[in-house]
Image: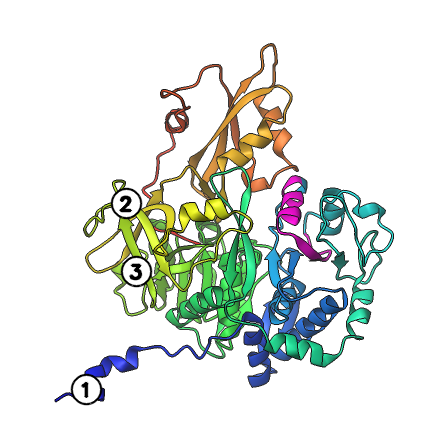
Amino acid sequence: MHTRSSILGARLNDVVLADDLLPLGQLLIRGAQQHPDRAALIFPDVRLSYAELAQRSWQIARSLIALGVHRRDHVGILMSNHEDLVASFFAVTMMGSVAVPINARYRTSEIQRVVADADLTVILTTNCGDHVDFRELLRDSIDGLAEVGDATRLNLAGYPALRAVVSLTDDPQVGMVSGSDFVSAGSRVEQDELVNRCAGVSLRDIALILYTSGTTAAPRGAMLTHEAFGRIWMSTGRGFGIKAGDRLWDPLPLFHVAALGPLVFTIGHGATFISDRWFDAGRSLQQIAGEAPTHLYPTYPPVVQSLLTHPDFARTDFSSVRVFLTVAPPATLHQFQALAPHAAQLTTYGGTEMGPASLSRLEDRAAERLSNCGKPQPGVEMRVVAADGSLPGPDEPGELHIRGYNLFSGYYKQDEHTREVLDDDGWFHTGDYGSIDADGNVIFLGRTKEMMKVGGERVAPAEIEAHLCTHPAVKLAQVVGIPDERLGEVPAAFVELKDGAHVEPNEMIEHCRGRIASFKVPRLVRIVKDWPMSATKIQRFRLRDQLVKELGTPTPRRNRGAQ
């Protein structure tokens, strides 16, 4: 006869009890309660303790309530890496509203669409851009903002939900609530109101909407609950071996999932998050040497390559590092591993809609960690589906499907597209091409869709094509991704001109600069008269192959994924 304990057996100890199942904002509050004086956030010129960061977030949340922001309202955050971005993110999530980080590289047309599409109630910004004043950018993007009377009660055509734009600096800004007025308004909100708001946040509430470009011309807002986002990233932190008192360095932009996710698990595990206003390889190496992080999260090939090729790289002390994560090609992974042979290098496969779905394990052999994307995380299912709908065997490729608590809740206001990628059985059809080996390790091989990934940014060709076609001389445009040593992939454009028109390729590139994000600007343009066609469609792959052959650029084998 088996006793209950013998039936459960030794595997009972393998079950991870989810005591970290807290709404995102409460993770910061818990950290402030448990270790108030520990450094939570470090930039080269700013250091904030858990108590200081939590207090700043609390103040922002009270001020948002004063502006009339309710639970489930959407709050946009437009900043480059800054302590106020971090504080704002936790403030919005602790009060039960929805954070909408806005890509700091977006320009007027992209910002216009996100502000309207996301139904933003309030936008928080500050003058922290190294190349752009976000306040001026918002005035250029949002029609009528520069002419408003009462900045606390906006009533703008095209943006019916927008109540206010807040500049978190104290200097007065036309059309915006100043930082001092924002704080003053918050001081009149009863503390108990925010306490009740915070206590009432549900794990199944939407915590944030992250915009990610798809195969259509417009970015899509992926809705993520506190549970989906928090649990998968806290699980990643555990797999990453992070614990209270550790120090994680992540140089990526904090509007991106590969920085927000590590921020959440760093704060959730009581560690210190180290970053910079912008990425510069020399500054980063100095910061690593000076701050002695225990964990590194450089993630993407452009960052890794910039570090590897910097003259100070070989002289930088990495002795404090225990674990780091990258998703570069194997040769680059081996280069990085050689500098810190004492540290474990991990890699992952995932995306905005599901976080890091697979992750290599610290206990895996180095050869495995440098050749695949690890196994699915606990509680996450992954499968490979062939074009005919069958389930192929080990090592046989197909489209990667994912199911689990970590999935997004759909694309905001895009029910039809949500139904296209989330089936009735709960599987998310990623559009990525890969395989799973006999040991359960995931191998990422590429994308079944036409979407590019420029560095860490997903880019839809149709989005660039739509902008190129706004030039009066353009009849038709097609964009393809071509290999790039630093960014992995960059856009290149083929343009057919209207009869009698004459435009130089550089003019097409200049037409894009400053109007769409820089990573979307075509690196080169070819003027064409004829297109390679199938029966009804232009064959993009032939355009790409033609350009690769012309440039003499080898096409790299893709063998891993990233957020």
Q: Which residue is label 1 attached to?
A: 6
**Residue under label 2:** 398
- Assess disc 1: are there few (<14), some (14-19) or many (≥20) residues with their C-alpha within 10 Å of its C-alpha: few
Q: Is residue 37 left or right of residue 483?
A: right
> Between 255 and 100, which is closer to the camera in this rendering?
100
Mark 3: few, some, or many residues within 10 Å (few <14, many ≥20)? Answer: many
- Tag 2 or tag 1, which sits nearer the N-term? 1
What amino acid type is highlighted by mark number 1? Ser
Tell me the quarter of the picture where residue 66 sits: bottom right
Residue 498: x percent and y percent? 58, 15
Residue tagged 3: 369
**Quadrant of image for the N terminus:** bottom left
Q: Which residue type carries mark 2?
A: Gly
Q: Which residues are magenta?
A: 109-129
* Residue positioned 43% across, 41% down in the render: 485
Image coordinates of residue 77 in percent, x first then y, are 65, 57
- The residue positioned 76% from the left and 64% from the top of the image is 67
